[in-house]
Image (cartoon, helix red, strand yellow):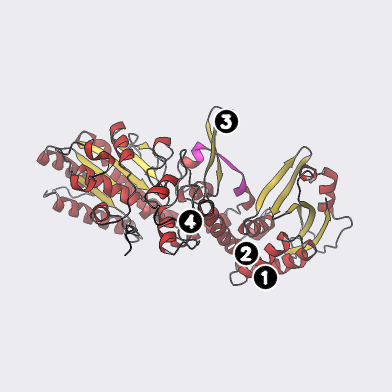
Amino acid sequence: MNTLKKLPLGIQTFAEIRENPYCYVDKTPLIAQLIDAGKAYFLSRPRRFGKSLLVDTLKELFEGNQALFKGLFIEDKWDWGQSYPVIKFDFAEGVLQSRAQLDEQLYEMLHTQQRRLNLKLTARSINGQFAELIRYTYETTGQKAVILVDEYDKPILDNIDRPERAAEIREGLKNLYSVLKSQDAHIQFVFMTGVTKFSKVSLFSGLNQLQDITLHENYATICGYTQQDLETTFAGHLADVDWVQLKDWYNGYQFLGEPVYNPYDILLFISGNQRYRNYWFETGNPSFLIKLFQQKAYFLPDLEQLEVSEEILDSFDVERINPVTLLFQSGYLTIKKAYTDIMGEMAFVLAVPNHEVKMALNNQLIEGYCQIDTEKKAYRTELYKLLRHGAIAELQPMLQRLFAAIPWLNFTHNDLPNSEGYYASVLYAFFASLNATIIPEDTTNRGQVDMTVMLGDCIYVMEIKLDKSTDYQPQNPNSALQQIRDKGYAQKYQDKAKQIYEVGMIINQNQRNLTQLDWRYA
């Protein structure tokens, strides 16, 4: 008979987990610290990261349900003789497509709360009813209210590709949240979660009392599983796992503290007989992100060496969305390193967190930039074999077939293929999907080469030139290869026990294809 505890897959209700034999990672040490340190908080984490379970844990704690916390850290540290009325809003369900639908949902939520708390509201407006709800709760119970908001931003994100509609919905939410400042005297605690953080000016105007703990090292592990969590709570389930491979696939999410695993990945990995798959990535298609990259003709190699200010990660607005901000807040990028720049300001180096996200994201980028689907796997497999084994002579015809397969008519109303970095972006997306090491704009003491790709025992130093002539004829010498030679771009790798190839590529914009590729051993 299996004596292992059950996996809490898809369960976001704290009581259900605690009243049944489910695995549970005790987050109450951090919850206790959070409550002791302040009153109002905001936390951003990617989807499927345990935010809803955290919110429900707070609800049960403030309502004084002591039995659920038996054996947990906080059991003997909480005053169970006192409970608080909890007002909880959860925007996770459904898709709202207008301000009217949002208002209707808010009225329904307020009605549910007043019925649950045995109150009768008289105000007619949404903000008026919410203010009454908080104030009447205090007047009837003698206790200040606890306000919990889960997935506060989902109504906006569901419409993020329609900026005008998203802005209308944002204003509706702003109308609701503005009440929190005026009712501060009747509020005990506020906790809000979401995937993104919209700017205070646009949504949280007047809510400066909310402390953002998204990148607070003390709370870096308040959502997600740590390595110790896996080796203790899930030890029986992961008895035979290859820890190095598991870390490479699913660990790596950094919030200025200990790195964590996405809980959803780990639970599905265990339940799926420890098969390595794109579990988390498959639950949400980043189609809007890909569209945003297309619209802005984003130079994909820049994803390898992103250094950004704190302001870039901090917030965005629907009228001016930075793709990097959305990539970070959605979990496709994470913090690799934090440092203080020469101006004395906090700055960050960003990277893709792990193997799962890297492979899946680059497959999506291939689709977005090339719009080839059925042939994609075949091209990736062939390219991997060529680069892995140094079959450089076969690279030109393979890449020519790849570019020839792109359905250019799909880009009739899109200038993406005409951008300077388009072809380098396509090559980058394919190389990155092979789990190759890529150094874009690889710097030497004499300049920088477009891209260095390392796979297996081979190093490829690549220069890519875009030719705009109407009748390109192959050059001798190849100007891209000659630049590599003249500048000595490959010299920095001479001491490595690997085969080094210098590769010069000429791509003609009118032919929309690779028209010349020459190479030599370095």
63 vs 272, left or right, is left
Q: Can residue 308 be found in the magenta stretch?
A: yes
Residue 73 at x, y percent in the picture:
28, 40
Residue 282, x across and y down, in percent:
47, 62
For marks 4 and 2, give the CA distance: 37 Å
Position of residue 192 measured from the top left corner of the image (x, y, whole percent):
32, 44
| Disc 1/disc 2 C-alpha distance (Å) | 8 Å
Bin the neighbour count of mark 3 within 10 Å (Cα to Cα): few under 14, some 14-19, many 20 and up. few
Q: Which residue is mark 4?
A: 241
Gap between marks 3 and 4 measured at Cα? 40 Å
Residue at 47% across, 38% down: 256
Instruction: Point out the stretch of residues depicted in magenta.
Output: 303-312
Please tell me which residue lies in front, 485 or 151.
485
Q: Amino acid at mark 2?
A: Cys
Q: Mark 2 — residue?
A: 370
Quadrant location, the N terminus: bottom left
Q: Quadrant of residue 403?
A: bottom right
User: Are dots 2 and 3 in contact, CB under 8 Å?
Assistant: no
Q: How many marks?
A: 4
Secondary structure beneath disc 1? loop
Residue at image mark 1: 405
Task: List the residue tagged with mark 3.
Answer: 341
Circles 1 and 2, Cβ within 8 Å, touching? The answer is: yes
Q: Nearer the viewer, residue 383 or 214?
A: 383
The percent position of residue 468, horizontal first and vertical second, equals: 77, 58
* Circle nearer the N terminus (4, 1): 4
Task: Give the residue type that dot 1 points to.
Answer: Ala
Q: Secondary structure at mark 2?
A: helix
Which circle's residue, 2 or 3, is located before the other in the chain?
3
